[in-house]
Image: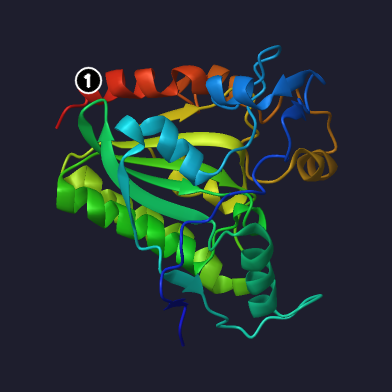
Amino acid sequence: MAWFQRVKPSIRPTDKRDMPEGLWWKCEKCGAMLHKKQLEDYVYTCLQCSHHFRISPYKYFSILFDGDRYSEFDDDLRAADPLCFTDTKKYPDRVHDTIEKKGKTEACRNAYGECGGSSLVVSAMDFGFIGGSMGSVVGEKIARAVDKSLELNAPLLVISQSGGARMMEGAFSLMQMAKTAARLTRLSEKKLPYISLLTDPTMGGITASFAMLGDINISEPKALIGFAGPRVIRDTIKRDLPEGFQRAEFLLDHGFLDRIISRRELKSELVALLGLLKV
């Protein structure tokens, strides 16, 4: 039974749906009106309140890799339908519609290049594809990113942005939690650094597997990070939750994160970190 399938790689998506169209955008946090050029100059963060807009893997690649030069790999993997799943529509139709409407092919993309002159492999998730959910393809891509790090003797950065496991694939999706966690041990055996960057949101099985297994766990400000949602937890324990519960700042105070880094300083901080972790 196929967990995923290969297709002929398509042209690079335009990511036209990642941000609103037009020259002026409204900050969803403070309501400030932001010009497109200003937003690009501030790497998609609000000039007024520093709110971090959700961005695609390609934008992270552009921010991190020197001169926007990188090589993408394993972009030919597509979701199969191992369970013949149907809810309001058939799973293959849902995947096809997402590809057609958003120009995205999966919830994860892999690339390697240089960051501040140091080799780096990046696996970045994309909330714009079925909520960034982790199915068999996402698990396989992260596993192959580990393999690429071993091949290049380079550190691995995984950027998490997901609502959790892709339940249209049932147990096949849940198996990716163990698969990715096990594959990451190979980096540890070779003493290659694994850096986990958690962005908004990082939830469910992603948090319960590779997202929290970094040698260094960092996050963007105000990112929602957790397993179950706050409402589910509140209804289960029948208690009010602390203010800011499941936000990056709360997790940093309680030892789950090593540092919170603004996207404006992400590359410079990462370059410094890679220098300290030089392999």
Amino acid type at mark 1: Leu
Which residue shows up at 85% across the image and 38% down it? 238
Which residue shows up at 69% across the image and 22% down it? 35
Q: Is residue 62 left or right of residue 222?
A: left
- In percent of width and height, residue 131 lies at 66, 53
Residue at the farthest front position: 23
Q: Is residue 152 above or below residue 48?
A: below
Mark 1: secondary structure: helix
Q: Is residue 158 above or below residue 64?
A: below
Label 1 Cα crowd, 10 Å radius (few <14 / some 14-19 / many 20+): few
Q: Quadrant of residue 63?
A: top left
Residue at the farthest top position: 48
- In percent of width and height, residue 150 lies at 19, 51
- In percent of width and height, residue 38 lies at 62, 19
- In percent of width and height, residue 268 lies at 36, 18
Q: Is residue 136 left or right of residue 214?
A: right
Determine which residue is flagged by label 1. Answer: 276
Q: Is residue 210 visible?
A: yes
Q: Quadrant of residue 66?
A: top left
Q: Quadrant of the C terminus?
A: top left
Q: Is residue 12 left or right of residue 200?
A: left
Q: Nearer the viewer, residue 138 or 31?
A: 31
Q: Is residue 216 above or below residue 21?
A: above
Q: Is residue 1 above or below residue 252?
A: below
Which residue shows up at 65% across the image and 31% down it? 53
